[in-house]
Each structure stands twice: as C-alpha cells, then as structure tokens.
Image: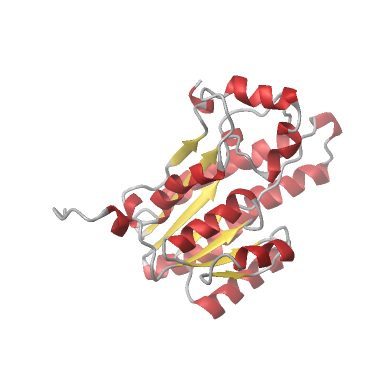
Amino acid sequence: MSSEVRPPSALFDLTGRVALVTGASSGLGHRMARVLAGAGATVAATARRVERLAELAATSDRIITFPADLTVAGERERLVAEVVERMGPIDILVNNAGAVNATPIEQESLDDFSRMIELNLTASWHLMKMIGASMVERRRGSIVNIASILGIVGATPAKDSGYTAAKGGLVNLTREMGLQWARKGVRVNAICPGWFATEMIEDLTATDAGTAFIENNTPMMRVGQVDEIDGALLLLASDAGSFMTGAVVMVDGGWTAR
C-alpha cells in the first residue's frame, strides 16, 4: 500500500482517458459529459437528438458527438466502432441513456414494456459487453451505470412497471459484472439518482401535486440539482474509486433511506 498522499485534484484527474456517455443530449447525461471533459477526459457523447448534441459539443473542445439510436443493436455496434476508430480505446463508459413510461400496467402494452427493457437495460448490457471486452484485454476501465432509486424501490404512485423492472435489473447486473471483472482490472459501479430537476420529470414537477409528492417523500424536501451528481460520478469514474466495484451509490436526498 502506498503511503503517498496525492492531491485531491490528482485523484480525480482523467487526463488522457476516453469516456463514452450515452443519453448525453439533456439532463444528467448532458451534465456528466461536461464534468468528465472538465476533469480532463476526451468525451464521446451520444444520443438521438442531433441539435442537442451540437449544443453540447459547443461547450468543450474535448466533447465529440456521435448521434445514435441505442434501442437498435446495429446502432450500438456502429457507435462503438466509430468511437474507437476516431478516439481510441474507451476507458470510461457511462450508461445513462433511458426513458420512462408512467403508465399503469393495465394500459401498458407488451411493446411498451419491451421498449423500456431494450433502452434501459439491454442497451447497457450490450455496450458493457462490447466495451468491457477491450477493457479486460487492457486490464483497465471503469463502467458507471446510471440506474435509479426506482431500481431499488417501487415507483407507485408514479406507476411504471417497465422502467422499474429495467432499472432493478441494471442494479443487479452492476453487481454481477463487478464480480466477473473484479480480478481483471475493470470496475463496474452504479449511481441511483433520486428526483432531479431534469427534462425527464418536467411533467411531474409542473404540478403542485407532483412537487408535493417529491418534497414530502424526500427527507431533504427538494429535488436534486444536476451539479449534485458530479461528485459520485467522478468518484466512480476516476482513480479515487479504485477499490470500489459492484457498488450502488444512492444520490437521492435520502429517499431510499426512509
């Protein structure tokens, strides 16, 4: 064990590393791409909305955009190939792309459920498989899966069986891959955000009842701000979290501690 005390800035420094952030056109993904670039990484940012990606790329010369639809397996394969060809091997993968479908199961179709699983779980598995293989060969890499508090507890009264099933699967997939790759130099961890002030929950926070629901059930009595994800992300992506794998980190204002 080293007795050296490294400056905090060195612990979180990502200079020379290549990161891929999915779902980067808005919300937490947009923020996380910028944070990783700010820590020195070169960031490949992907999402479907080309205009939003262009706005993101304008914020940093370390961010390069790759439009893709991650619900399509061929698009995921093309994305990884293009990023590696243009930027080199990927050192950090942030599986953030996701969507919700707040619908009671009685009105939810099989296709609805399948789409939730494909984007929120299968796409993450597929990217981990493709990118993780290279990480294992190089014995170096960090994968950060953005799960949700709704992968730990139920969503009702919001009612979303597909999203909760997918995020619950992502939480346990994180633990499994953390174990499979623990001796191979690759760390796999997850962040479970609570209710953050992003586009994803605009419909909920637009109403007094929705705002009250969040405030009354979050011990800190408020939504999270996007910059409050920065610390957990940098911890898991950088050498600061070098002895963490299979961990599930709650960033939820106390929601799951109730």
The relative height of residue 173 versus residue 125 in the rendered view (above or below) is above
Q: Position of residue 189 (x, y in %)?
A: 45, 48
The residue depicted at 39 percent of the width and 63 percent of the height is 14
The residue depicted at 84 percent of the width and 29 percent of the height is 106
**Left or right of 134, for residue 9:** left
Given residues 62 and 157, the one toward you in this image is: 62
- Check the image and tell me how it is coloured: secondary structure
**Left or right of 156, for residue 222:** left
Given residues 82 and 253, the one toward you in this image is: 253
Given residues 118 and 255, the one toward you in this image is: 255
Give the residue at the far bottom of this rendering. 85
In the picture, residue 160 is in which quadrant?
A: top right
The relative height of residue 125 versus residue 229 in the rendered view (above or below) is below
Q: Position of residue 6 (x, y in %)?
A: 22, 56
Q: Position of residue 25 (x, y in %)?
A: 66, 58
The residue depicted at 45 percent of the width and 61 percent of the height is 38
Give the number of marks: 0
Give the residue at the far left of this rendering. 3
The residue depicted at 37 percent of the width and 53 percent of the height is 182
Q: Position of residue 55 (x, y in %)?
A: 66, 64
